[in-house]
Image (tube, helix red, strand yellow):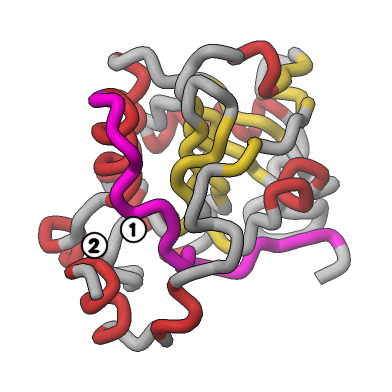
């Protein structure tokens, strides 16, 4: 059992839930298109040959607020400076917590938090979220240059909404990106995501 797995089990996550069938090995990332905050239609295909991070967000979620105390922004800035495409995705349905009715409201939130993704995608109908089976906010994916998902799950290994836990946590997304950059197989390919349940249209 790895150190990351031991820590998550100690935090109350069952061991069986930490290893999802089919996620132990890289798999093709589902194709998608979505409109961004500038009204442009973006697709995964346009970033072919680049490392891509997908981050599901709900601005009202306490787990998201924890990471947007500076942790998420720092990770976004470091990743994009290294050539990574970072797509933040808002999939909360209309009328539900975290829904952005338009690009302007999303940009206002981003500016207020100092968010640093490549762009934010509006997915209020949950099309992209459904394709990726996104479960929580945050829920993180790392897609390598071949278009394969090489990491999925939690942003770090302490599943709490407490800001004071950030310095003690191992950032699993940063670790996955470091492995990808070095040309290594990602050491930890899946950890059960934690956070608020994603606010799907029919949920």
Front residue of 110 and 196: 196
Residue at image point 75% right, 13% down: 40
187 up-or-down from 201: above or below: above
Q: Position of residue 38 (x, y in %)?
A: 68, 15
Indicate which disc, 1 or 2, sits on the residue closer to the N terminus: 1
16 up-or-down from 90: above or below: below
| Pointer 2 residue | 163
Residue at image point 87% right, 67% down: 202
69 up-or-down from 34: above or below: below
Q: What's the mark number on residue 66?
A: 1
Assess disc 2: are there few (<14), some (14-19) or many (≥20) residues with their C-alpha within 10 Å of its C-alpha.
Answer: some
Whether the magenta-drawn stretch holds residue 56 is answered as no
Q: Position of residue 171 (x, y in %)?
A: 25, 50
Residue 128 lies in what quarter of the image? Answer: top right
Count of labels shown?
Answer: 2
Element marked by disc 1 = helix
Residue at image point 47% right, 83% down: 16
Front residue of 19 and 128: 19
Does the rendering let one see residue 74? no
User: 11 left or right of 48?
Assistant: left
Which of the image's four quarters has the N terminus?
A: bottom left
Which of the image's four quarters has the C terminus?
A: bottom right
Element marked by disc 2 = helix
The magenta region covers: 182-201
Residue farthest along the left direction in this orientation:
168
Q: Are marks 1 and 2 in contact (CB under 8 Å)?
A: yes
Whether the magenta-drawn stretch holds residue 200 is answered as yes
119 up-or-down from 101: above or below: above
Assess disc 1: are there few (<14), some (14-19) or many (≥20) residues with their C-alpha within 10 Å of its C-alpha.
Answer: some
Does the rendering let one see residue 10? yes
Residue at image point 78% right, 26% down: 33
Q: Position of residue 83 (x, y in %)?
A: 37, 13
């Amino acid at each position: 059992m790895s150190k990351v797995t031991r820590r998550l089990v100690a935090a109350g996550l069952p061991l069986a839930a930490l290893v999802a069938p089919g996620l132990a090995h890289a798999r093709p990332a589902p194709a998608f298109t979505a409109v961004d905050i500038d009204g442009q239609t973006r697709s995964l295909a346009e970033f072919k040959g680049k490392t891509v991070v997908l981050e599901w967000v709900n601005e009202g979620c306490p787990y998201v607020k924890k990471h947007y105390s500076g942790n998420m922004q720092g990770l976004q800035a470091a990743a994009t400076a290294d050539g990574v495409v970072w797509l933040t995705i808002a999939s909360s349905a209309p009328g539900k917590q975290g829904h952005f009715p338009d690009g302007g409201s999303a940009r206002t939130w981003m500016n207020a938090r100092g968010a640093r993704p490549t762009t934010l995608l509006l997915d209020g109908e949950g099309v992209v979220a459904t394709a990726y089976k996104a479960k929580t906010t945050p829920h993180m994916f790392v897609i390598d240059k071949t278009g394969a998902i090489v990491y999925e799950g939690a942003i770090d290994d302490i599943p709490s909404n407490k800001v004071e836990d950030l310095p003690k946590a191992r950032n699993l997304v940063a670790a996955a990106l470091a492995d990808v950059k070095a040309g290594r197989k990602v050491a930890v390919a899946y950890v059960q995501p934690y956070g608020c349940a994603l606010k799907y249209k029919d949920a």
